[in-house]
Structure formats: structure tokens, C-alpha cells
């Protein structure tokens, strides 16, 4: 299939992109194109205008602020994040998750902003953002607003972004010394979207998990955070995993039944917690 005809603009600045969005409410932003182009080809969307963000240098890059906040520009490619030593040190969970996103060729083009704005329930990055309590910096013609990841993902392939806004940066809070990361997913083949997955951060003291932020993805219609406030030692991990799976509402589709996904959640939460405690 080929896309319906569309006009194309490639602005050089964020302000120019926002002005185009304001003037064309039916426009779509183009980042890496790895999700949008198939959507256009299947004519699931037929925007009158594509606004290409690839020439806006200010939207890409990785930096750390004085308080340890890791800031990643929306147009930063998955591969740049995966290869970044700075990311590996500043946010071990991101570093664990990146190689699971699609294949290297897709990671060369796909961007963090595109992945979060697309909000596929089986994508890894929304769950990582929930587990890290990341903040989205969203720009509109009148300024910037910040939104916690928990408020950003609003439904199945839906976010709180308005048609006149763009995601500019993702802000990951500083990673405390006692924090550990856990990540586990199951997909049919490496690089496929996950049937179910878990991304978590756990604050560990003396071999015991004091609290954890466990984000489920792939299994339900929206990535979901399950905060764990009570301390957890190794012996109670299996109970916690069982309880989280029992409280989940996995969907059934042609890839897997709801029962199978619930089973996966239990196993993956256990594995990810064990990984965090062992690291
Ligand atoms: P695009 O496709 O350009 O855009 C996606 C959507 O986001 C569009 O609606 C666009 O308008 C909007 N958008 C883009 N940037 C912004 C912005 N800054 N502000 C507001 N809106 C914006 N992803 C995974 O997470 N895990 C996988 O396992 C996985 N497997 C894949 C396998 C295949 C075969 C393919 C083709 C893709 C796969 N993906 C997977 C998706 C991939 O990670 C994409 O890179 C990602 O979903 C979209 O990023 P993009 O930069 O290509 O965005």
C-alpha cells in the first residue's frame, strides 16, 4: 500500500514546528517514521501535512543536569541511547531495556519521543518511564508544560498530548545509590513486540527491597505502574509476583490468551525482582 497524498514541511526550529501545528490541526509530526510510515501506508491515518522533526537539532541529545536529572531530547535515536555510556551510568534500567526494542536497523531511526508519543502498550520505553517516574516536557506555542509519565499515558495508543503540542524532552530523575533495576520480557522472537514485560526500579537496603516501582507492559491495554511499598526479602518475591499477576487484566488476542499473559506476568515480575536484588 502507498500513503494518501500529503504536504510535507521540514522546519528548522521548534517554534516553526509549533506554528505549523497551530495552523494545521490535522497535521502529523514525523520522527523516525518507524511506526508512522506503516500507519500511513495502511491508510490508518491520512494527515494533510507531515511536519518532519529531523532537522531540528535542538530536539536531540542526552545531557545530565547538576542534580543528576538525565534529560533526553525527543529526537534522540534509540541506538544513541543504547550506546551511551552516560545513560548506562545515570539510568541502568534504560540501558537494560534498549536492546529489546525492535531490531538494530529500527533502533537506528526510531526515537524516544516517537515511541512515547505513539504509546504502543507493548513498547518498552513507556514502562521504563513509569518505573523511573520520568517527566515529559511538552512544548506548545505558549510555552512548556511538564507531565509525569503516570499522567501522560492515557489509554490504548493514547497520550495526553494535544494536537498543537510536541514532546520535546524526557526527564529521568537522578538515580539514587541504593536503586537497582530489573527488566524482563517475553516475545516470540527477539525484536518482536513483547507479549508481556516488566520494567522495575527497586530501592535495596541490606539485600532487602524496601520499595519498588513495577511497570507492566505488553499484557494490558495501557502500560501500568504497580507500586510496592512494603519491604520484600527474597522469600516473599514469589508471593508478590503472584499477587501482581492475580490483580492484572491481560488482554487476549491472536498472539496469546489472557491466561498465558497472566502466567507470564507472574514469572517476569519474579525474574525482574530477583535480578534487581542480585545486582
Ligand atoms: P514515528 O513513527 O515517526 O512517530 C510515531 C508517532 O509519534 C506519530 O504519531 C508521530 O506523529 C508521533 N510523534 C513522533 N515524535 C513526536 C514528538 N516529538 N512529539 C509528539 N508526537 C510525536 N517499539 C518498541 O518499543 N518495541 C519493539 O519491540 C518494537 N518493535 C518494532 C518492530 C518493527 C518491525 C517496527 C517497524 C517497529 C517496532 N517498534 C518497536 C517501534 C519503534 O520503536 C519506533 O521507533 C517507535 O514506535 C516510534 O518511533 P519513531 O521515532 O519511529 O516515531
Image: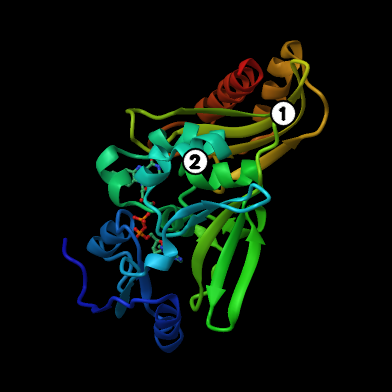
Question: Could you tell me residue 190's position as x and y percent?
Answer: 33, 29
Checking the image for residue 86, the label placed there is 2
Residue reaching furthest to the top:
235
| For the residues bearing labels 2 and 1, Cβ distance under 8 angstroms | no
Task: Give the image quadrant in which the ligand numbered 1 is located.
Answer: bottom left
| Residue drawn at 46 percent across, 85 percent down | 22
Question: Could you tell me residue 268's position as x and y percent?
Answer: 56, 24
**Of 135 and 217, the residue lying toward us:** 135
The answer for how far apart the CA atoms under marks 2 and 1 are is 18 Å
Question: Could you tell me residue 231's position as x and y percent?
Answer: 82, 24
**Of 207 and 244, the residue lying toward us:** 207
| Residue drawn at 70 percent across, 36 percent down | 176
Secondary element at tag 2:
helix
* Up/down of 218 relative to 142, above or below: above
* Residue 147 in the figure: left or right of residue 125: right
Which callout, 2 or 1, points at the residue further toward the start of the chain?
2
Q: Is residue 250 visible?
A: no
Q: Mark 2, mark 1: which one is toward the viewer? A: 2
Checking the image for residue 226, the label placed there is none
| Residue drawn at 23 percent across, 62 percent down | 41
Q: Is residue 179 visible?
A: yes
**Of 199 and 45, the residue lying toward us:** 199
Question: Could you tell me residue 168's position as x and y percent?
Answer: 50, 65
* Residue 200 in the figure: left or right of residue 234: left
* Up/down of 47 relative to 273, above or below: below
Checking the image for residue 178, the label placed there is 1
Amino acid at each position: 500500500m502507498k500513503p494518501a497524498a500529503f504536504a510535507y514541511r521540514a522546519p528548522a526550529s521548534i517554534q516553526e514546528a509549533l506554528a505549523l501545528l497551530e495552523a494545521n490541526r490535522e497535521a502529523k509530526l514525523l520522527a523516525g517514521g518507524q511506526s508512522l510510515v506503516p500507519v500511513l501506508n495502511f491508510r490508518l491515518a491520512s494527515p494533510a501535512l507531515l511536519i518532519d522533526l529531523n532537522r531540528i537539532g535542538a530536539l536531540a541529545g542526552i545531557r545530565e543536569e547538576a542534580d543528576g536529572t538525565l534529560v533526553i531530547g525527543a529526537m534522540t535515536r534509540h541506538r544513541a541511547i543504547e550506546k551511551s555510556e552516560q545513560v548506562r551510568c545515570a539510568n541502568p534500567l534504560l540501558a537494560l531495556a534498549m536492546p529489546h526494542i525492535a531490531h538494530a536497523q529500527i533502533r537506528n531511526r526510531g526515537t524516544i519521543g516517537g515511541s512515547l508519543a505513539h504509546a504502543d502498550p507493548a513498547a518498552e520505553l513507556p514502562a521504563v518511564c513509569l518505573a523511573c517516574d520520568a517527566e515529559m516536557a511538552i512544548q506548545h506555542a505558549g510555552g512548556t508544560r511538564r507531565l509525569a509519565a503516570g499522567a501522560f499515558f492515557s489509554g490504548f495508543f493514547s497520550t495526553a498530548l494535544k494536537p498543537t503540542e510536541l514532546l520535546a524532552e524526557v526527564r529521568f530523575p537522578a538515580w539514587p545509590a541504593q536503586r537497582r533495576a530489573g527488566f524482563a520480557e517475553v516475545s516470540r522472537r527477539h525484536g518482536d513486540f513483547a507479549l508481556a514485560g516488566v520494567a522495575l526500579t527497586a530501592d535495596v537496603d541490606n539485600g532487602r527491597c524496601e520499595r519498588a516501582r513495577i511497570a507492566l507492559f505488553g499484557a494490558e491495554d495501557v502500560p501500568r505502574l504497580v507500586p510496592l511499598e512494603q519491604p520484600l526479602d527474597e522469600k516473599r518475591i514469589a508471593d508478590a509476583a503472584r499477587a501482581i499477576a492475580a490483580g492484572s487484566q491481560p488482554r487476549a488476542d491472536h498472539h496469546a490468551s489472557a491466561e498465558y499473559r497472566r502466567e507470564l506476568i507472574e514469572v517476569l515480575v519474579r525474574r525482574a525482582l530477583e535480578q534487581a536484588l542480585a545486582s
